Image (cartoon, grey):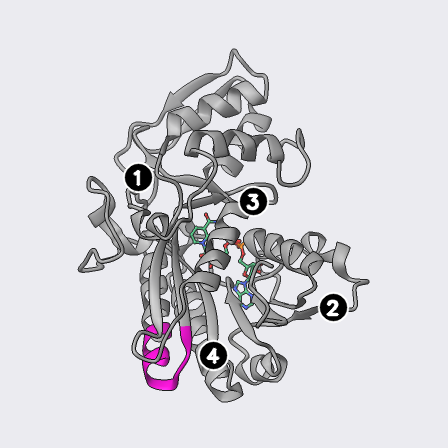
Amino acid sequence: MLLGDSIHKVFVTGGAGFIGSHIVDMLLPQGYEVTVYDNLSNGKIEYISHHFNKPRFHFIQADVLDLPKLIDNLRGHDLVWHLAANTDIIGGYTQPERDLRDCTMAAFNIVEAMRLTGIRPILFSSTGAVYGDLCKDLSVSESAGPLLPVSTYGAGKIGSEAFLSAYSYVYGLQAWIFRFGNVIGARMTHGVIYDFINKMRQNPRELLIRGDGQQEKNYFLVEECIEGMAFAFRNIPMTDEHPCDVFNLGTTSISKVTTIAEIIREEMNFPEANILIEGTKKAWPGDQPRVHFTVDKINKLQWKTCYSSDEAVRIAVRRMLGKTDGMV
Ligand SMILES: NC(=O)c1ccc[n+]([C@@H]2O[C@H](COP(=O)([O-])OP(=O)(O)OC[C@H]3O[C@@H](n4cnc5c(N)ncnc54)[C@H](O)[C@@H]3O)[C@@H](O)[C@H]2O)c1
């Protein structure tokens, strides 16, 4: 069982999004009752509509920022899996308040609603973006600091982590915070793989890489991300003395952006396409071209991804192109 036997009803914020909808797909066949709470600002109804006729599935189209509605709908659940956030990282440049609102304020409302309804455990999707420039050359662990974000998205997530931690110590919540690498698979609506595939569909003759072409990050499959979070929840208990912990989650390897472009060119069968590099230092304000972090903490607890970063990229590309179904 993904979350063990003590959990029956799971509240998934952002459950109509890329990662959230995969969580729902994994929970329902295992007998869990699942509520998706999503305002559909970036989620898609077709990612969850195949569950609409199931009695253990509930969908609430609403905003996490609507605290009274959130409290009403949260009552009676055993666990919160909080994924709702602004995920348009580039868009943060023109609308920085979105990261304050949909990341930090949203997280505040979630922990406040948990306090008022007496729900204690929460799994939270944070990001390597919290490390800012610390992870550009060195591979950083969870204890790296000071955390000085270089994007408003990173700032929004640090704010979220801070409220989860404070509410855990002050009000008895139990928080598992996960700083993801790049999560990939079918149903992506953003990110480099999604962008490159769309660019190549528009112009099969060339693919322009923004930035300096030296970008490298770790990429891992969505189901491995979900299993990693569930593994930590099942095996690493939070206690009154230590009610909140943070885990980097991803692979031990990285993929270079040029390798991703080559894999996409190959899988789309456009061997003649020219891969061009724009040559600017950063692709956009707030970009983190290189993200290096260690996953030693979770690896030592006996959880590892099965696929390397490059293998995961190829599998995700195939899924996005409809070459493979489901999780293979
Ligand atoms: N995909 C990645 O590589 C990655 C990496 C690091 C962290 N994360 C985090 O994982 C989570 C899920 O990411 P994803 O890639 O599935 O993104 P996504 O955009 O597909 O999912 C986010 C969902 O949240 C919903 N949402 C946003 N604001 C909301 C609000 N105020 N109220 C209710 N619903 C709201 C959106 O409609 C969407 O369905 C996010 O918190 C993201 O920051 C993702």
Q: Ligand 1: does it lie within 8 Å of the C-beta at label 3? A: yes
Cα separation, mark 2 vs mark 1, equals 42 Å
Is residue 129 shown in magenta?
A: no
Q: Which residues are magenta?
A: 164-174
How far from the left and from the top, in percent, is residue 229? 47, 57
Around disc 4, counting alpha carbons within 10 Å, would you say few (fewer than 14), some (14 to 19), or many (20 or more)?
A: many
Cα separation, mark 3 vs mark 2, equals 25 Å
Q: Look at the numbered discs 4 and 2 and tell me whether their residues touch, using CB distance below 8 Å.
A: no
Instruction: Residue under label 1, please give it.
Output: 289
Q: Quadrant of the C terminus?
A: top right
Instruction: Residue under label 2, please give it.
Output: 56
Instruction: Residue under label 4, please give it.
Output: 120
Q: Specify the amino acid type for callout 1.
A: Pro
- Residue in front for this viewpoint, 136 or 310: 310
Instruction: Residue under label 3, please give it.
Output: 188
How far from the left and from the top, in percent, is residue 134? 20, 49
